[in-house]
Amino acid sequence: MLKLDHVVLHSDGTAHVEDLKETLQSAGIPYEPSWGKKARGFRISNIWIGRQYFEIVEIHSDDNLWQPQWADRHREGERGTFCLFLKVDRNIDDVYRQLVDSGVEATAPERTRFKWLFGLLEKKLPWRFITLPKIPGTDIELGIIEYDEGAERKFEPFMVPNGTEVGLTGLSNPVIQSFHSDLAEQWLAQIQTAIGEPLPIAVVARTSDEALHLTVESSAGATFTGAAFSDVTLSP
């Protein structure tokens, strides 16, 4: 079964990320961008809410090692939500073949790698992913990710700071606003048929600057009332 995993969101630089930190902390969501990881030309920091997260991207230089198609989009001036990733609990090679055999465009499965020390060292991360084109009528690509066995459990100590500290336990129910919601629904239905699993995504006609809405799940006693940043809205 496919589940929401994370959202890739491109910021407008360090000052924007600091503003985002203030917005989130005012809403009661822990976020510490200084704990992020740097590689050549970019920095990544995560907003963790349970096991789901936002991957906040800062591009510091055109000469960077970030995902090429997203680096190109950033260079062309795009900002905000770039990709919504769903997690699959089966072999991603099979998912890829099902998509391609059904005529759905997708990148071949790849493993995230980071290089440092002038490219002499390389770290391979314990997941593989594919990306699909932008959902019709939006600037949001769809991604599918498969984690290596046991990887999520091993990464739990690094899922910090986390909304679980204040009773926020997860993100769910993605709703995407599209300027062509009928085409978006048809495209998502084609993917669903190809892989034989329901997609946990709803599409509505776009009527505002909001591109993505997510529900924040919480435990009893949590006081979260909502937050909005970039082109995303969160609600209880």
Image (cartoon, rainbow, N blue to C red):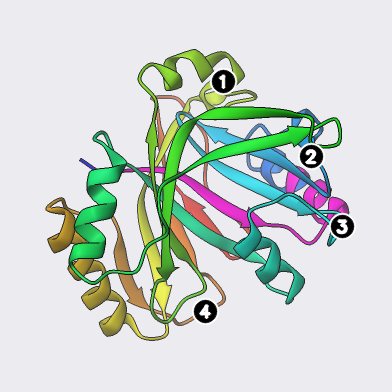
Q: Quadrant of residue 39?
A: top right
Q: Which mark is residue 165?
A: 1
Q: Which residue is mark 3?
A: 61
Give me the disc on residue 39: 2
Indicate the secondary structure of the residue bearing disc 3: loop
CA separation in Å, label 4 and label 2: 35 Å
- Asked if the residues shown at circle 3 and circle 1 are in contact, with their CB atoms under 8 angstroms apart, the answer is no
**Where is residue 83 drawn, in percent x and y?**
50, 58
Q: Is residue 133 above or below residue 107?
A: below
Q: Residue at x 26, y 74 (%)?
A: 187
Give the number of the mark in front: 1 or 2.
2
Tell me the residue that label 4 is attached to.
208
Name which residue type carries label 2: Ala
Q: Which residues are magenta?
A: 3-21
What residue is at 65 percent from the left and 60 percent from the top?
Answer: 68
Compute the Cα span from label 4 to label 1. Answer: 32 Å
**Which mark sits nearer the N-terminus, 3 or 1?**
3
Quadrant for the N terminus, please: top left
Mark nearest the camera among 4 and 2 is 2
The residue shown at (42%, 59%) is 107
Task: Answer whether residue 7 is visible to the viewer in this image.
Answer: yes
Q: Residues within 10 Å of mark 4 (few under 14, many from 20)?
A: few
Indicate the amino acid at tag 3. Ser
Q: Which mark is residue 51?
A: none
- What residue do we see at 46% from left, 76% from top? 138
Disc 3 versus disc 1: nearer the observer: 3
**Kind of residue at disc 4:** Ser
Q: CA distance from mark 2 to mark 3?
A: 11 Å
Foreground label between 4 and 3:
3
Query: What secondary structure is found at the residue carrying circle 1?
Result: helix
Residue 71: in magenta span: no
